Amino acid sequence: MIYDVIIIGLGAMGSAAAYQLSKRNAKILGIDRFSPPHKFGSTHGETRVTRKAIGEGAEYVPLALRSYEIFREIEAETGEDLLTVTGGLIISASGKKNALHGKCGFIEETVATAQKFGIKHQVLSSDNIRREFPQFNLDGSEIGYFEDDMGFLRPEKCVAAQLILAEKIGAELHRNETVLQINTLSGGVEITTEKNTYHAEKVIISVGAWIENFVEKPLQDLFKVYRQVFYWFDVIDNFDDFKSDNFPIFIWEHGRTENDFVYGFPAIDGANGGLKIATETYLETVSPENVNREVSQKEINEIYEKYVENRIIGVSKKCLKTATCLYTVAPNARFLIDKLPENERIIIASPCSGHGFKHSAAIGETLAQLALTGKSEIDISAFSF
C-alpha cells in the first residue's frame, strides 16, 4: 500500500494534521514512538494558554484565530470541553522592551495586533489592574493588556479528540512504534520502523524534541531543546480569589532580563487543584533521552521566592505537584513549517518554540493543505527555512 501521507509524531501538530487530512479523505498513516497523549514531550500538563492577539508578531494571528474556530468545531463533534475562555491579562513594566519569545516590546506588539485584527481588549494602568485583580502585588510602574477571549486549552484532550476523530474517519494510527529511517525513492518516500516498512507520496515530520533524528546538519543546528517545569501551588485557604470568575489567565513580564516572566492559570480544577504557574528557562540544552524529569525542592523554593512570594497574594508555598516538558526552540523562538529544502516530499513541522499549542489546530490544517496541494491558505512564508 502507498499512503498519500505518513505523519511521524502524533502530538499537538501531528494529531491535528491527522484529523485534517482524514477530513479530506486522504489515505494516511500516523506513527508515534509512544501512545499519545503522553507526558514525554511537549503536549501535556493539563492546560495551555490561548490568546488571539499575538505579541510574537502579527504573522501568527491568523493561525490563532483559525484555531479558535477549529477547536470549537471539534468540541461540537466530540462533546469534549477543549477550550475555556476566562479572559486574560498581560502585565509588563512600563517602557521595558525586553524580549519574550524572541520579540521585544511584547505587550506593545500584542496591543498592535489586537487593534489590527479587531480583537476585543483593554489597556490598563497599574491602578486599573489593582482594582480589578488585587491578587497581583504591583509596584505602580506596570501597564496591562486585558483580552476578553483569552483562555486555556486542555492539551491532552485536544490531542486525544483529534486522534479519535481521525481514526473514526479512516486514518491508520500506529502507536508505540519507532521510526528508524526515511529514504527517498523515485515517486515517493519509504519509512522504515522497528516493525515494518511503509511507502507514501508525502511525509510530515512533527516529532518535537526528537527532530534532530530526522534532519541533517546544518538544519540540526536550528533546533535546541530545553527542559521546562510546571508548578501547582496550594490556594485552598483563598480559593475564591483564584477561581476563574475572579482571576485571569496571566502573563507577567517582570522586566529585569530577557524572558524574565511568569505565566499562570486560575484554580480551574477546584480548591484542591492548585494554582498552576510556570516560567521559561534556557540555560542548558537537553535531549529527550537525558532530560531530568524529576523536580527538586530547591527548584520549587526558587520559583516560589522569585515569582510568587510578594507578587501574587494568597498563594501558599506548598507545592501540590509538578510536571516537566520539553521546548524545541528555533532561532528567535520562531516557528518552522516548510518543505525540506532538499526534498519537497518531506514537510517539517516544528512550530512550537514554547508558544505553539494555541496555533496547533490551524497548523494541522495548514500541513494538510501543504501535503495535498502544495500550498496553504494561511500565509506561512514567515515560518520557512
Image (cartoon, rainbow, N blue to C red):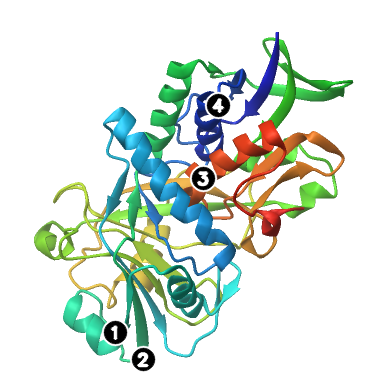
Mark 4 or mark 3, earlier in chain: 4
Q: What amino acid type is highlighted by mark number 4?
A: Arg
Which residue is under mark 1? 138
Image marks 1 and 2: residues in contact by CB distance under 8 Å: yes
Does dot 2 land on a helix, a strand or a loop?
loop
Which one is in front in this view, the residue at disc 4 or the one at disc 2? 4
Q: Foreground: 316 or 180? A: 180
User: How far apart are labels 4 and 3 at the CA level?
Assistant: 15 Å
Residue with the mark numbered 3: 362
Mark 1 and mark 3: Cα distance apart in space: 36 Å
Quadrant hosting residue 222: bottom right
Tell me if 10 is positioned left or right of 37 in this view: right
- For the point 31% across and 70% down, the residue is 308
Task: Please determine whether, in this image, residue 263 is positioned above or below residue 136.
Answer: above
What x and y, as percent, mark residue 230?
A: 39, 53
Task: Pick whichever of labels 1 and 3 is earlier in the sequence.
Answer: 1
The N terminus lies in quadrant: top right
Around disc 4, counting alpha carbons within 10 Å, would you say few (fewer than 14), some (14 to 19), or many (20 or more)?
A: few
Residue 3 at x, y percent in the picture? 68, 17
- Disc 2/disc 3 C-alpha distance (Å): 37 Å
Judge depth for marks 4 and 3 and give the one in front.
Answer: 4
Crowd band around label 3 with a 10 angstrom C-alpha radius: few (<14), some (14–19), many (20+): many
Which dot, 2 or 3, sits closer to the camera?
A: 3
Q: CA distance from mark 4 to mark 2?
A: 51 Å
Disc 1 and disc 2: Cα gap in Å? 8 Å
Residue that numbered label 4 is attached to: 24
Q: Amino acid at mark 1?
A: Leu
